[in-house]
Amino acid sequence: MLDLFDTPPIPGLSTRDDLISPAEEQALIAGIDDTSLSPFRFQGWEGKRLTASFGWNYDFDTQRVARAAPIPDWLLPIRQRMAALAGLDPLVLIQALLIRYDPGAGIGWHRDRPIYEHVVGLSLGARVNMRFRRRRSHGGFDRVTVPLTPRGAYHMSGEARYDWEHSIAEMDRTRWSITFRSPSSRWALPLDPVLSI
Ligand SMILES: O=C(O)CCC(=O)C(=O)O
Ligand SMILES: [Fe+2]
């Protein structure tokens, strides 16, 4: 039984606590820490969070999308569970993004790139709030705060993903996240980056 919000705080956003066990969380954290991560780069600027992309990568420096190394085997079981949570075929989740936020790192206000459609994330380590905001036509913002519990997952699509921006404030304890994304139907990204090479 999914404990999705009865009434989502924003249409298109759902969360689920305890998708994985504490032992699975530790194994995934070890997997992320064993991966070569690099500081997120945005048009010459370097962010404090450390990232690695698999399947596909959107390069914020060159503003181009490119193939990345295939999604590693150790991520496939969790991709399967996160796809089921979102009601998706695991194969449509063509991108995996690993992030480590050390103390002082966060993520500023943004919408995910339009080349992607569904966004399914898993939160590991520190508990944080994901903040959402949407500009009102007459000034100011509508704002919603959604707690992300360790080992919990979220699914963003539709209004939550396209009409609202999200961000995570700088934190004082380490948090890791794993995000899977599907390609937008407006872009012709092959579903399987390995087979289609
Ligand atoms: O760490 C997270 O859960 C969110 C990451 C995020 O919003 C992004 O990479 O676009
Ligand atoms: Fe995002």
Image (cartoon, rainbow, N blue to C red):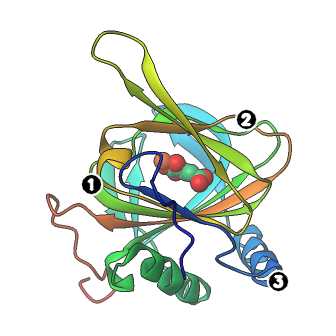
* Mark whose residue sits in front, 2 or 1: 2
Circles 3 and 1 in contact, beta carbons < 8 Å: no
Q: How far is mark 3 from mark 2, CA to CA?
A: 26 Å
Secondary structure under badge 2?
loop
Height in image: 71 above or below 195? Answer: above
User: The disc labelled 3 sits on which kind of residue?
Assistant: Ala
- Residue under label 3, please give it: 23
| Structural crowding at the residue carrying mark 1, measured as other residues with C-alpha within 10 Å and reported as few (<14), some (14–19) or many (≥20) | some
Residue 115's label in the rendered image is 1
Q: Give the quarter of the figure containing the C terminus.
A: bottom left
- Is any part of residue 70 visible from this angle? no
Would you identify the image quadrant in which residue 122 lies? bottom right
Seen at 36% across and 78% down, the residue is: 87
Q: Amino acid at mark 1?
A: Ile
Q: Position of residue 72 (x, y in %)?
A: 55, 83
Residue 59 visible in the picture: yes
Q: Residue at x 76, y 76 (%)?
A: 25
| Element assignment for label 1 | loop
Looking at the picture, tell me which residue is in the foreground, 93 or 130: 130
Q: Is residue 195 above or below residue 158?
A: below
Q: Of marks 2 and 1, which one's residue comes earlier in the chain?
A: 1
Residue 77 against residue 148 in the figure, above or below = below
Query: Residue reaching furthest top?
Result: 139
Q: Which mark is residue 170?
A: 2
The amino acid sitting under disc 2 is Glu
Left or right: 94, with 45 as reference point: left
In the figure, is residue 21 to the left or right of 147?
right
- The location of residue 53, given as percent across then percent down, is 51, 64
Secondary structure state at the residue bearing disc 3: helix
Q: Residue at x 85, y 47 (%)?
A: 173
The mark found on residue 184 in the picture is none
* Mark toward the viewer: 3 or 1: 3
